[in-house]
Amino acid sequence: MIWIRAFFMCLGMFTAIPCPYRPWDEDARPRMTAMLPMVGLVIGAIWLALGWLARAFLPTMVAAGTVAALPILLTGMIHMDGFMDTVDATMSWRDAEERRKILKDVHCGSFAVIASILLCTGQFAAAYELLARDIRVLLLLPAASRCLSAIAVSILPAISHSEYAKGSKHMDTAITATAMLVSIVIASFFWLGICGGIAILAETVAYMLAMAWAVHSLGGVSGDLAGYALCVAELAGMIAAAIL
């Protein structure tokens, strides 16, 4: 039962998906990170199902806008918020301490606005192309990105003000998430073919590069950085799938 509670706690915290069962158990809290990939599969399943419906019943441009907006709406914009905060901090080109202060600042700067516009434009363009192809990759993109987030917050040093600085690192979570990521990559090659597999690999590389840049700039990982890398990675995966 504790793993079930951890799953629904993770679902309630990191998504806006309606769910009548929203428990909170401090004993299950350390297991929430391990449930991120499972929550990613739920998001991916809804994204794919609504993408199929949008393609079937909506004009192409409207369907593309719907597909592009869904990962932002399904997560309650929590990862987009982290993306914007991180961009504001890393693009300020201040010293590390000042960048960390900007990361915590509740105000939205011009860098965040510009970057979010570019992100949404990229997602719309990729969605438009994807709708003419095989959109099954949408199922796996959120699961893979959340495997990477689970690994990152489990093994990387945390910024002092981050919620991840309060607890100990969980290598078992990182190992489990890595095994799940490898399984997703292998499944993508078998289920989606070489193009789908490359799209998941592109997402993985993009996440690692984005996280490496953010950690280098800010001196550690946090939930905001995980959201930033996740947004970049899913965009990269969509673009790769649209191009191939």
Image (cartoon, rainbow, N blue to C red):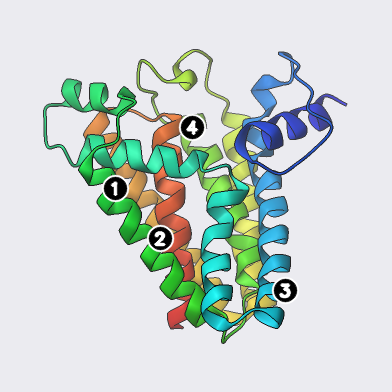
Mark 3 vs 4: CB contact within 8 A: no
At which x and y percent is residue 120?
Answer: 40, 60
Classify 10 Å Cα crowding around label 1: few (below 14), some (14-19), many (20 and above): some
- Residue wearing tag 2: 120
Residue under label 3, please give it: 53
**Of callouts 3 and 2, the N-terminal one:** 3
Amino acid type, residue under disc 4 in the picture: Val
Q: Do the residues labelled 4 and 2 touch (CB within 8 Å)?
A: no
- Single out the residue that lies furthest toward the right: 1
Mark sitting earlier along the chain (1/3): 3
Mark 3 vs 4, N-terminal side = 3
Q: In the rendered structure, which amino acid carries the disc numbered 3? A: Leu
Structural distance between the alpha carbons of marks 1 and 2: 11 Å
How far apart, in angstroms, are the residues tagged by discs 1 and 3?
A: 30 Å
Q: In the image, is 207 to the left or to the right of 117?
A: right
Mark 4 element type: helix
The residue labelled by disc 1 is 113
Q: Report the disc number at residue 153.
A: 4
CB within 8 Å, label 3 to label 2: no
Label 1 sits on a secondary structure element that is helix
Q: Where is residue 215 in the image (x, y as percent from the top left)?
A: 30, 35
Position of 170 compared to 160: left or right? right
Q: Distance between the residues labelled 3 and 4?
A: 35 Å
Assign the N terminus to one quadrant of the image.
top right
Q: Which residue is drawn at 57% across and 37% down?
A: 174
Measure the C-alpha gap from mark 3 to mark 2.
21 Å
Q: What element carries label 2?
A: helix
